[in-house]
Structure formats: structure tokens, C-alpha cells
Amino acid sequence: MVLVRVQRIESIRDPAGLLGKRIELVEERTIPHFAIKPATEEARMVQGVVQALQQQLPIQAMRSGMNLPKIILFLTEEEYDQLGIKFDVNQVYEVELSNQKLNFSKAP
């Protein structure tokens, strides 16, 4: 099982000209935060500068640039309806990979 988050939903047209959706899913991971005590005065100064920058810049914007898509779905409107899931941006889903199938369900 893999946890994925809907990062982007776009309207598209397939090669036949039918309207559809492009759904980009990224893996949802928790990034552990470790408290590191720098050994030298220079390292403490660098850590202070980094912390000051993190407070000034939105850290989520920096992280979202590093998220590579795990799954990209290109679906016509009919296929999207047949899938039976209404994807919402930032919603987390569980994806089960088994027997050559992908099963989506909303994460609890």
C-alpha cells in the first residue's frame, strides 16, 4: 500500500478531442525532523541562518518543488466517472497494488 496526495488536477483533451482530466498524485511521506546540535560556532551560525530563512520563506513551497509525481492519470470524463472516485486536490488516498490492479480508497 502507498499513500498518495492529489497535487494537481487539470482539464485536458485526448487525441480524439474528448474532454478529460490529468490527475497528478505524489507520494505522501512524513519527513522526520531531528534536533541537531552543531558542534562548532560556525555550524551554529549556519543553522541560525537556515532557521531564519525557513521562517521567512514558505517551507511548503520549497518542498512542493521537490515532489515528483508517483502516478499521473489521463482519463476521459467517462473513464473518470467509471473509476468512481472524486479526486480533490490535497486529499490523501491509499493505493493498493496487487494482481496487476490499482485500488484507490480515501485515507482515514
Image (cartoon, grey):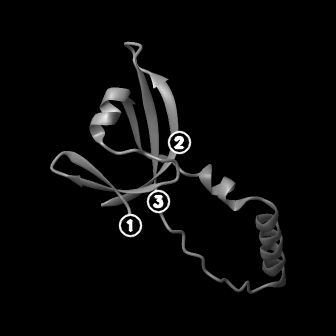
Could you tell me which secondary element the residue under label 2 belongs to?
A: strand
Q: Residue at 70% of width from left, 61% of height from top?
A: 59
Q: Which residue is mark 2?
A: 8
Foreground: 29 or 75? 75
The amino acid type of the residue labelled 1 equals Pro
User: Does 34 sit left or right of 48 as displayed?
Assistant: left
Give the quadrant of residue 63: bottom right
Foreground: 12 or 32? 12
Tell me where residue 4 appears, x and y as whole percent: 42, 55
How packed mark 1 is, by other alpha carbons closer than 10 Å (few <14, some 14-19, many 20 or more), is few
Q: Residue at 78% of width from left, 78% of height from top?
A: 43
The amino acid type of the residue labelled 2 equals Arg
Tell me where residue 70 appears, x and y as whole percent: 42, 48
Q: Which residue is mark 3?
A: 28
- Which numbered disc, 1 or 3, marks the residue that appears first in the sequence? 3
How packed mark 2 is, by other alpha carbons closer than 10 Å (few <14, some 14-19, many 20 or more), is some
